Image (spheres, rainbow, N blue to C red):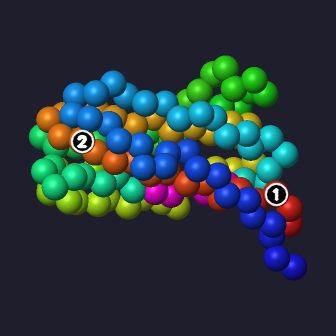
């Protein structure tokens, strides 16, 4: 039997200009799911940033998603021109009710962020 999968996007080509404020994605509800996997990339433009961009995956265990915790360390991009840093899979077990992504921290040049989610909804 094949597991049922459902996809969602946390960050879809979110551009943070050099020195711009961090961005927090909307939360995706994982209640009733049998776990999920997150993956994505951090993509520099034609001129790389002086300080690399980062993505932090955050999870919540409460039903309202009012308290979030870091899911591991930050995923750090590179500083090279047109450099792409891919990440994942980051496994999220059952019991997590919400997931979101925070991106930014790059300086001087724009960086583009992607983060996608694949959720198991039946087994």
What secondary structure is found at the residue carrying circle 2?
loop
Quadrant including the N terminus = bottom right
Q: Which mark is residue 56?
A: none
Q: Going 80% across and 41% down the picture, which residue do you hit?
A: 31
Name the residue at the bottom extreme.
Answer: 1
Residue 97 screen position, x and y as percent: 73, 37
Mark 2 or mark 1, earlier in chain? 2
Residue 11 belongs to the span the image colors magenta: no
Q: Position of residue 69 (x, y in %)?
A: 56, 30
Determine crowd level at label 1: few under 14, some 14-19, many 20+ residues with C-alpha closer than 10 A: some
Image: 101 above or below 67: below
Q: Which residue is mark 2?
A: 110
Q: Over which residues does the magenta segment extend?
A: 36-40
State the image quarter where residue 2 is shown. bottom right
Q: Please state the total of marks drawn on the protein image.
A: 2
Task: Residue 37: say if magenta.
Answer: yes
Q: Position of residue 8 (x, y in %)?
A: 64, 52
- Residue 122 visible in the picture: yes
Residue 121 numbered mark, or none: 1
Q: CA distance from mark 2 to mark 1?
A: 36 Å
Numbered disc 1: secondary structure: strand
> Whole-percent x and y of residue 87?
42, 58
Q: Residue at x 16, y 55 (%)?
A: 46
Q: Is residue 91 above or below residue 60?
A: below
Q: Nearer the viewer, residue 70 or 41?
A: 41
- Quadrant including the C terminus: bottom right
**In the rendered image, is residue 70 in sight?**
no
Task: Name the magenta segment's main secondary structure.
Answer: strand
**Residue at (75% x, 64% y) in the render:** 5
């Amino acid at each position: 039997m094949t597991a049922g999968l459902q996809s969602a996007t946390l960050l879809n080509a979110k551009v943070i200009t050099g020195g711009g404020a961090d961005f927090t994605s909307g939360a995706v509800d994982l209640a009733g799911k049998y776990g999920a996997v997150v993956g994505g990339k951090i993509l520099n433009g034609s001129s790389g940033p002086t300080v690399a961009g980062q993505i932090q995956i955050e999870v919540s265990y409460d039903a309202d998603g009012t308290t979030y915790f870091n899911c591991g360390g930050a995923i750090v991009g590179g500083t090279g021109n047109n450099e792409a840093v891919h990440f994942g899979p980051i496994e999220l077990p059952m019991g997590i009710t919400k997931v979101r992504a925070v991106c930014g921290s790059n300086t001087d040049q724009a960086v583009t962020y992607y983060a996608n989610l694949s959720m198991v909804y039946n087994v």
